[in-house]
Amino acid sequence: MTPYTLPELPYSPGALEPHYSGEIVALHHDKHHAAYVKGANDTLELLAAAREAGDYSQINMLSRSYAFHLSGHVLHSIFWTNMSPDGGGRPEGELSAAIEEHFGGFDQMQAQLTAATVNVQGIGWGALAWEPVSGRLVVEQVHDHQGNVGAGSVPLLVIDSWEHAYYLQYKNVKADFVKAFWNIVNWPDVARRFAEAQQVPPSV
Ligand code: MN
């Protein structure tokens, strides 16, 4: 049993159409996400071999590779469950209240997360995250899979901004992909993640 395994999609690949094409979802999950799972497992083996040999000549490359692949696995796993054929609309309850408190309203949060995602330079993600030190919801603009985020923050809602996430359907118009994404957001999943994240005590 390897440490990391590819989760099943919680719906059929075409279930998110017309907002997100089944061809992209299938490739994205079966090829891209699978590669991050394999990369994380392979890198753990290489790190074990390095310890065995007492050879840390590749430690910088291996450390980066591990963070990159592990974070890719984590973000994609969240991404799939953040979407639903029955998604869209707006959050309710405590999540809605927290968005109101920390952003001034849903529209403001949506605008900030959209801007952070659409304007990623190169490859990255937009994320609505729980920041446990201050006890706030924040928007982060993730570089690659693992950069430009505050230590300890917990991603709740993530939007893939890599070209592989949208190009087959939306070509160069990333903004249209993000606009469509809001129609398939699984708010109950985001609310569940929000409730779980708050169980973790502040890290400092
Ligand atoms: Mn991706």
Image (cartoon, rainbow, N blue to C red):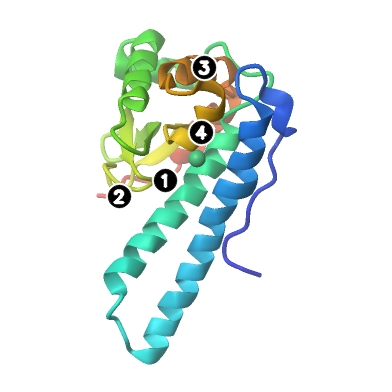
User: In what element is the residue under mark 1?
Assistant: loop
- How far apart marks 2 and 1 lie (CA) works out to 8 Å
Does 169 appear above or below 55? Answer: above
User: In what element is the residue under mark 4?
Assistant: helix
Contact between labelled residues 3 and 1, with CB atoms less than 8 Å apart: no
Residue 80, horizontal then vertical, whole percent: 59, 36
Quadrant of the drawing holding the N terminus:
bottom right
Contact between labelled residues 3 and 4, with CB atoms less than 8 Å apart: no
Contact between labelled residues 1 and 4, with CB atoms less than 8 Å apart: no
Does 195 appear above or below 65? Answer: above
Mark with earlier residue (1, 3): 3
Q: Nearer the viewer, residue 178 or 138?
A: 178
Q: What residue type is labelled 2?
A: Ser
The reply to whether residue 195 is visible in this rendering is no
Contact between labelled residues 1 and 2, with CB atoms less than 8 Å apart: yes
The residue labelled by disc 3 is: 182
Contact between labelled residues 2 and 4, with CB atoms less than 8 Å apart: no
Q: Does the residue labelled 4 lie within 8 Å of ligand 1?
A: yes
- Which numbered dot is residue 165? 4
Q: Which of 76 and 99 is in front in this view?
A: 76
Tell whether 128 sits left or right of 21.
left
The residue labelled by disc 2 is: 203
- How far apart marks 2 and 3 lie (CA) works out to 31 Å
Residue 133, horizontal then vertical, whole percent: 27, 40
- How far apart marks 1 and 3 lie (CA) works out to 28 Å
Q: Which amino acid does label 4 sit on?
A: Ala
